[in-house]
Image (cartoon, helix red, strand yellow):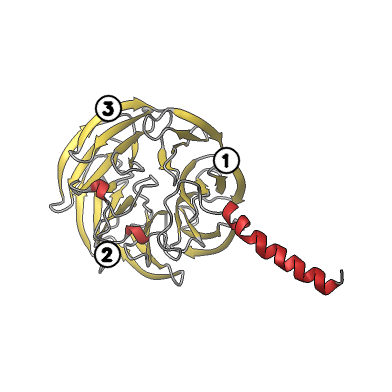
Amino acid sequence: MNFRSLTFWMTVFCVAIAPLANAQNGPLPGMPPVLDPSDIYAADHAGKLSDAVKGIPERVYVPNSGSDTVDIIDPVTFKIIGHFAVGKQPQHVVPSWDLKDLWVLNDLGDSLTHIDPKTGQKGETIPVEDPYNMYYTPDGKFAIVVAEAKARLDFRDPHTMKMVDSLKVPCKGVDHMDFTADGRYLIASCEFSSTVLKVDVENRKVIGTLALEAKGMPQDVKTSPDGKVFYVADMMANGVYLIDPDSFKRIGFIATGMGTHGLYVSRDSKTLYVSNRGEGSITLIDLATRKIANKWKIPGKGSPDMGGVSADGKQLWLSGRYNHEVYVFDTGNGKLLARIPVGKGPHGLAFFPQPGRYSLGHTGVYR
C-alpha cells in the first residue's frame, strides 16, 4: 500500500470512529440536555419558571450565621414576614435539584433544616456532618455536601441525605463550585490553599489541581454561558480569574474591586454581577467581551456577599455580611432600592423561586 492509499484509509477510519468518540465524551448520563450550546443559562431567562414551582410565592430566605436564624423577606414589600431559629452557624439556603425543597445548611450544627417553599414553614432538621455548602450533580443523582473543615466532598442521596460516597480533596477550604456545560466535571475553589480543583463527576475523582496566587483566597465559581470559561472570584487578589476548563489553565484576570466574592449571571446571560465585599461595590462584566462594563457603589459602603437575581431579572439581592442587612439593586441602573435590616452575619441568601429546569445548588445555580 502506497503512502497516498494509507492516508486515505486513515482518514476513513478517523471519520468512522468520530461518532463513537463523541458518544463516549458526551454529556453526563442522565443530565437534562442543554437547550442552547451557546447559552447554558437559556432555561434561566426571565419568565421561564418550571411547572415544579407553580404557585410557590416569591420569597427571599436569609441565613444569619451569627444569629443562628433565618429571616424570610417579601420581595414586593421588602418586609420580613417570617423568622425562625435553626442550627448553629447557618451558611447557605440551598434549593433542591427538583426545585421542591429548600435546605438550610447549619455548618457548625452538623445539620440541615428543611423549609417548605410553598408555605415558608420550617420542617425537620436532620444530622449531616460539616455542611458548609451544598450542590447537586447535574443528573440529580447526588447532593454534594461541601464539608469544608473536613476537606471532603460528600456525595449523598439527594432525598434522604444518607452518605453514598466521600471524596477527600487535596486542599484546605474547599467551598464553592460550578459544573462544565456537559456536566462531566466540576471546578471547585479552595479558599485556604489558593487553588482550584477539577473533579470527574461520574467517577468522583480529583483529576487536576491548579495553583493561583500564593496568598489568594478563591471564592465563588461560575461557568460562562458558552461553557468555554470558568470565572473564579478571589477575595485577596481583588478580582476574577478566567480559567479554561478543558486545559485547566489560567487564561486571564479581571481586577474588579476589594474583596471579590460572589458571582451571578443576569437573566439575559449577558452580564456577570461580581460582589466586592471589601469595598461595598458590584462590578458588571460583559460576558461577550470579558471586560468591565460598569460598577455600582453602595452609598456609605457595605459588605455585599452572596445572593441571587430576581425571577424577572430586574433586581439583584445580596446579603450584607458584616452590616446585618440585605441589599436590593435595580439591575437596570444600579440604584440601591433597599437596605433591609436582618440578623447577624447574613450569608448565602436564596431568592426563590427562580427560572430554570433544575438546581445545581448553592444559593440557586440553575440550568
- Sequence-wise first label, 3 or 2: 3
**Residue 320, image x, y percentages:** 29, 49
Q: Are marks 3 and 2 in contact (CB under 8 Å)?
A: no
Q: What residue type is labelled 2?
A: Thr
Mark nearest the camera among 1 and 2 is: 1
Foreground mark, 3 or 1, reads: 1
Q: Which of marks 3 and 1 is nearer the N terminus?
A: 3
Residue 166 versus residue 189: which sits nearer the camera? Answer: 166
Q: Nearer the viewer, residue 340 or 322?
A: 340
Residue 116's image quarter? top left
The N terminus, quarter of image:
bottom right
Q: How crowded is mark 2: few (under 14 residues within 10 Å), some or many (20 or more)?
A: some
Looking at this rendering, what residue extends furthest in the bottom direction?
A: 4
Residue at numbered disc 2: 331
Q: Mark 3 points at which residue?
A: 124
Q: Name the residue under label 1.
A: 203
**Residue at 51% in and 52% down:** 27
In the rendered image, is residue 303 in sight? no
3D distance between C-alphas at marks 1 and 2: 40 Å
What residue is rendered at 54% in x and 54% in y?
Answer: 26
Q: Badges 1 and 2: C-beta atoms under 8 Å apart?
A: no
Q: What is the crowding at mark 1: few (fewer than 14 residues within 10 Å), some, or many (at least 20)? A: few
Q: What element carries label 2?
A: loop
